[in-house]
Image (cartoon, rainbow, N blue to C red):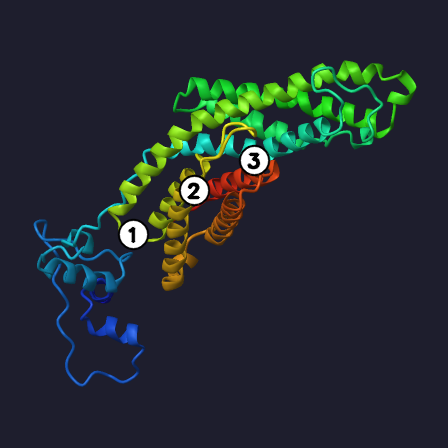
Amino acid sequence: MKKYSLLLLSLLLTLVFTGCEDSFLMRKLKKQEVAAPTSAPKKSPALPTATEKSPTPPSEKPEDNIINKLLENKKPTEPTDILTEKVPAVPKPAEDDNSSLKEEIRGYVQCLNRTRDRVNQSKARYLSWISSEVAGPNCKERYITYGLYTLYDDGMKTCRNAADNGAQTPPSLPELEAAAKQLATSYETLVPLVQEVYDYYEQEDYKDDQCVKAKAYHPKLMAAFNEFQAASAIIDQALDPLQDKIVADDLARLETQGKKIPWHVVKFVQSAQGVQKQIPATAEGAWNIQGYNQAYTQLEKDYEALEAYVQANPEEAQKIMLFSMFSSNAKDFYVQAKFLRRDLADSKKVAPNSVNKLIREYNQMVNQANSLRY
């Protein structure tokens, strides 16, 4: 009898500990209550039959039962994901279809900015003192010690990279890319040659060889100078219509978004191109004073409009990376164009340095405009 009583007690305890969460003993163990219950304990659950669900496994926490019951009783509701809600469509800015073309042009402009002005200055320095451009120096010239200016070594890499990138990436511009390759090659020839000639005159070696090397250097030097300038002129001619297309497309694209800073920047670049086109093809060419004045008037109008908009919308300008640099370049070009207009109005002969400076300021301004990120 004692043996059966122990067996019944063991079975009762097992059912109590594996029963539902409402069991008195489970609540007591869970809450660590010391006081005895004031009401009689609930009956222990009966043993499950083969068709009934098995009790909750001991490994499952009682809290999970509550969560599962809540989930089972939860009624389905409509989706609440905010991504499914209808919101007004935000119009995308019009895409720039000329981005690849701009990148290629930027490389050529950087090449010209780093090389052309210095090459022109070096050639002008050399021709300023030699007795004959055709025959070359005789080493008896009064200012022979002037020699010539050395060139920038890093320009070789800048121009070679521009030529290689242009040939390897779209769009395909055969004439322009061939001229860029020729310009890079001629500059790579010029840099060491000019350095050698510079050292020759700087060290007055013509006094030791009776001007032999001076006469031998001359045709090589002039051929390299002329080859570089010819390639430079081809690049200028090829860039003009491309830049006109870029500006026209940009204005049309940006106008759909409102005449904000990007639109004013492009409008100023367009008027700057108009000024550039008034420069004669050669230093000896005649100036169209009326044409230049008309182009300058438009430039002044667009510059003032740009400045007025920026002053009225400083927060917009501050959000544009590198805009302050562009603004400075734009002002430099505008001022140089103003000085040139005054010289023409006073019937003064336009100095080559003034023209070169205007071209340099223009190229820097355009390059900076193409670098702006809105």
Q: Are marks 1 and 3 in contact (CB under 8 Å)?
A: no
Q: Is residue 199 above or below residue 94?
A: above
Neighbourhood count class around disc 1 (C-alpha, 10 Å): few under 14, some 14–19, many 20 upward:
some
- In space, the residues marked 1 and 3 are separated at their CA atoms by 30 Å
Q: Residue at x 52, y 44 (%)?
A: 340
Kind of element beneath mark 3: helix
Q: Of marks 2 and 3, which one's residue comes earlier in the chain? A: 3
Kind of element beneath mark 1: loop
- Which label was assigned to residue 272? 2
Where does label 1 land, which residue?
A: 259
309 or 142, which is in the foreground? 142
Q: Is residue 54 visible?
A: yes
Neighbourhood count class around disc 2 (C-alpha, 10 Å): few under 14, some 14–19, many 20 upward:
many
Q: Of marks 2 and 1, which one's residue comes earlier in the chain? A: 1
331 or 12, which is in the foreground? 331
Amino acid tagged 3: Asn
Quarter holding the N terminus is bottom left
Q: Are marks 2 and 1 in contact (CB under 8 Å)?
A: no
Amino acid tagged 1: Lys
Q: Residue at x 45, y 25 (%)?
A: 237
- Which label was assigned to residue 113? 3
Corner quadrant of residue 184: top right
Q: Is residue 128 left or right of residue 207?
A: left
- In space, the residues marked 2 and 1 are separated at their CA atoms by 18 Å
Amino acid tagged 2: Ala
Give coordinates of residue 229: x percent, y percent. 58, 24
Q: Are marks 2 and 3 in contact (CB under 8 Å)?
A: no
Q: Is residue 11 visible?
A: no
Q: Is residue 115 left or right of residue 251?
A: right
